Amino acid sequence: MEQVFFIDKIIPADTAAVPITDSSFLYGLGLFETMRAASGTVFRLSDHLDRLFTSAAALSIPCGLTADFIEDAVKQVLKANHLKNARMRLTLSSGPLAQTDMPKGTLLITATEFTPYPKEYYDRGARVILADFRQNPKDPTCGHKTTCYAPRLIALKQAHEKLATESLWFTTENNLAEGCVSNVFLVKDNVLYTPRADTPVLPGVARKTVLELAEKLKIKSVEQVLTIHDVLSAQEIFLTNVIMTVLPVTSVESHTVGDGKVGTTTKKLMEAYEEKLKG
């Protein structure tokens, strides 16, 4: 039976119960992190926790937990489920609404066997569509991974219904932002482009990793405002998150990206990312 870390200890998944007054359940006042464990170690766990604590402070979501406490809890979950390679989720809710004295968030950590995206996506490239919705830069939750995730899931479902892997979001100013569950990169004339973090977009852990790898590989990278014209003129496009790693895109709607094949810059970053993950 699956074991989870709930509040302060490991318990069977089917015994974990969130109070009906929990603010995340009622209003989506919570945060989550999707993490990748490889060879028994969570990839860049400290970056995930830094982002969690930063968002908790920005959105006034009580945490009351230390990084050391959460790191130990993550290890306990992997051990309890006998997992080395796993997809993990850390959820932090604001806790019960009635909780006023010394508020402390409700922590839940789960782990399941890691299942990668289909190999054909990496060999041939994936297809994406453009989301009908818009990302509002004035929305205080933008740039944070909150449990209020319905718009992203709706757009992702629409993409899947159209036989696409992802859906690209633009802002209300029509600037390229991100995917439903990913960050987006473009390559043009051997230069790597990605939307600025203050677009705003989620400061992805895989995004950060790719920018670091690009520097090591001496691939020039630029964070700037991008539009649909940049998307359509890109010679390569790829998406990132810690589960998909570096996922090439070869078509946007009916538009073919570049020559319709996985590009050389994308391949270099795919290989470098996998090596870093193994290390």
Image (cartoon, rainbow, N blue to C red):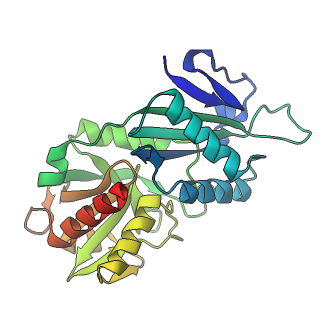
Residue 153 vertical position relative to residue 215 in the rendered view, above or below: above
Q: Quadrant of the C terminus?
A: bottom left
Position in image of residue 13 (x %, y %): 56, 20
Position in image of residue 188 (x %, y %): 22, 79
Q: As drawn, is 90 to the left or to the right of 219?
A: right
Q: As drawn, is 21 to the left or to the right of 30?
A: right
At x 70%, y 45%, the residue is 69
Q: Residue furthest right?
A: 101
Residue 252 visible from this viewpoint: yes
Position in image of residue 53 (x %, y %): 67, 55
Question: How many discs mark residues in the rendered view?
Answer: 0
Closer to the camera, 81 or 98?
81
Residue 31 vertical position relative to residue 144 in the rendered view, above or below: above
Question: Residue 3's image quarter?
Answer: top right
At x 80%, y 33%, the residue is 97
Question: Residue 191's image quarter?
Answer: bottom left
Residue 223 vertical position relative to residue 68 in the rendered view, above or below: below
At x 63%, y 20%, the residue is 16
Closer to the camera, 80 or 104?
80
Residue 81 vertical position relative to residue 199 in the rendered view, above or below: above
Q: As drawn, is 272 to the left or to the right of 243?
A: left
Closer to the camera, 47 or 127?
47
